[in-house]
Amino acid sequence: MNPMKIRWFLILAALWTVLVPSLRAGEPVCVVTHYGGENGLNLRHANQILQDSTGFIWISAWNGLFRYDGQSFVDFHSQQDDSYEMAGEAIRTMWCIGHRIFCRLDGGNAVFDTRECVFRDVTPDETEFIPENPERFYQGHAAHPGEEIVYTDLFGQQWRITDEGEIYYLDSAVWKHFSYRISSPSLRRWMEDRQGNLWILGSDDSVWKMSFVIRPFSRIAVADNSHVRDISPDSRNRMWISLLNGKRVLITDSHFNKIGWLASDGTIQLEEQSFGASVFKIFHASDTVVWLGCRAEGLYRIMNHRDGTVQVAHVDDLPNKTVYDIQADAAGRLWIATYGGGVVCIPNPTDAHPRVLTMGDGLGVKVSGMLRVRNIHIVRNMLFAATGSGLLIAQIPENDPDEIEWHLHGRDPRRASSLSANATTDVTFDGYNTVYIGTETGGVNMLDIRQNLLADSLSFKHIGRDDGLGSDVCVSLHYDDIYLYIIGNTSVMRYNALAKEVTNYDSRFLHDNLIFSEAHPVHADNDTWVIGLEDGLMQVETRSFGEYQYNPGIVWSSISMAGGEEPYYAVNGLQQLILPPDKRTFTLRFAALDFVNSSAIDYSFKFVGKGAGNHWMYLHGNNSITMMDMRPGTYYLEVHSTNSNGVWVPNTRMLRIVVPEKFTESALANVLILVVAVGIAIGLTRFFTLRYVRRKERRRCRQSEA
């Protein structure tokens, strides 16, 4: 692919990037990976490295050729039982033309066919590719003693690697020392692959890879890197941010420049100070009224009057003083989620002395199991509340709140369409017909609100790890356009409700121990999202969630038949696999050729055919499939993967699998068996009939003689 295209789609693609563990703040992002014996790579006098037309990485050494698909190394060398005798065992150098790797040996030259995975002689037509000095065919560059590697990555960052393995990067015309080094006495050779990774051979036969990625998100510093519990924009485009550390509320403009701090008297002060309570929820009821739900402190109402005065009222006569959420219905009544006191209603929130209605006392019948409420969402006249015991649903009465009837829906192990877990965390609505319910351990549930929501039993659909989610843990939910964003502990997961596809932005991007908070994401503007962390804020451009990602091709790496046979590696060109009649169990290994962070790639497969499931199965990092004792028929195996960023890409590859019938399984065999069975049955019938007739005749004869 064109390097410029790679540069742009990587810039648009990555949400987060993989970081070296020792990365210091302010450094460009580079992942340095070492390959050696621990990876199955045992080299002796390595001399060349290249990438073939398919995308495999090849390394030549005195002890053979080594192929790398991002998952494992495979070595090819002369064997005792080879029909072809090589003119020497040590490969001194190599170069690649098409599917052929030309190898210079001690006693001549040989060709390795990358499609057939065998060595052979050079044909007369190939002698033109065997120059005395093949340097013009080499990929990469030699690293001469005392010289440095100077390289500009796809994002314009300049790098220097010294002969001793020290790494430097250019920052404002100054070369700065990078926090990682290549631990080799000296460098032998280096090559840039088509993805922009830098491959380096060390003089000690070590292999190193430098991957360069960008990080199109930024941290927004908050005081003391505090836990952000809520982010709430007001009508003046100001952001109210609750910080649990120090019981503070920070107010900023829409670009997160500090305006001031909320004081205990409700005013905004330039000097940093505590509000006096840990604020869990900020709710802007109007341009002039703000409600604050607090931990162990109940509710605060801040009213800004026209004369410039500010009045703070404290509502603490709640059944439990820890408030998780505040919402308003169409009539202006407030509905409060308390963690231990159930749902609370304030029917007169603007009065001087707001009245509090609780479950069992002015708000319907108190029902056990509904007390720990985390989130409330009101859709039309229906209230949905996420509780620690299930999903609470009620129809909001037009007049008397005491007429409300509560319906609690939990997990029923006898019913697959019940809620997937009792501990629910958040509720959101797509604006049409679906309510989404997040859980602590059961992923996300979908509820079609066109069914009777007041019924004793409701039908839910589920999205979880089996459907491609990176985690079943949901901290909060946000619906935007056609996407449901699921905030987990350490990941953001995006569900395309129309295509029913999942994209994971998880630890494969993070690697700096980011932990997301319970704060719902907000749009700072049309192009920017802000997500709360347990140690600050993250700002992400909306386009970073785009579909345009690096799309690695999938290769077939090997096939192993049952019975202990050696794997067969010349399989990448296969479009159809015909199994021998006596070998119906096999293992197929595959890889997506993305070398930035190959271990982060996830795979899924679908098996289409008679008796097959015909739905995607997620392998979660495993890159092989074992098919056991397949029945006769024709099947289609489809394999799909993410890239190294963890994003599912359109790279599905298909393999047709034919399982021939054994004679004993054929229709003719069945007919013959039937004919034989019928013949045996007829024969036995005649035999026993004749025996019976003869016995009867003998008895008659004996009776006549008597």
Image: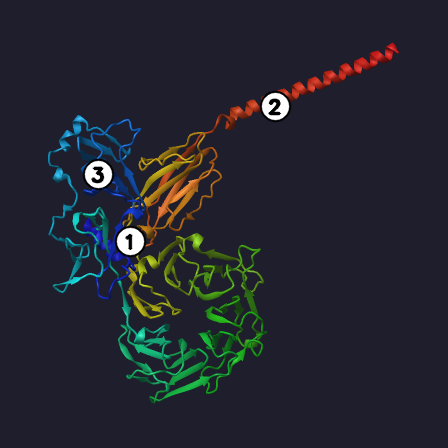
Instruction: Name the quadrant containing residue 95.
Output: top left
From the viewer's perspective, is the residue at label 3 or at label 2 nearer?
3
Q: Quadrant of residue 173?
A: bottom left
**Label 2: how many Cα within 10 Å (few below 14, some 14–19, many 20+):** few
- Looking at marks 3 and 1 on the same chain, the residue that comes earlier in the sequence is marked by 3
Q: Amino acid at mark 2?
A: Ala
Amino acid under disc 3: Trp
The relative height of residue 641 versus residue 80 in the rendered view (above or below) is below
Q: Residue tagged by mark 3?
A: 62
**Quick check: 425 left or right of 567?**
right
> Vertical placement of 64 versus 211: above or below?
above
- For the residues labelled 3 and 2, the Cα–Cα distance comes to 65 Å
Q: Residue at x 44, y 32 (%)?
A: 583
Which corner quadrant of the image does residue 233 belong to?
bottom left
Residue 552 relative to residue 457: left or right: left
The residue lying toward the viewer, choosing from 572 and 674, is 572
Residue that appears at 86% across and 11% down: 704
Residue at label 1? 548
Where is residue 293? Give x, y as percent.
43, 78
Mark 3, residues whose alpha carbon is within 10 Å: few (<14), some, or many (≥20)? Answer: some
Mark 2 highlights which residue?
A: 677
Residue type (three-letter) at the residue carrying disc 1: Tyr
Asked if labels 2 and 3 touch by Cβ distance under 8 angstroms, the answer is no
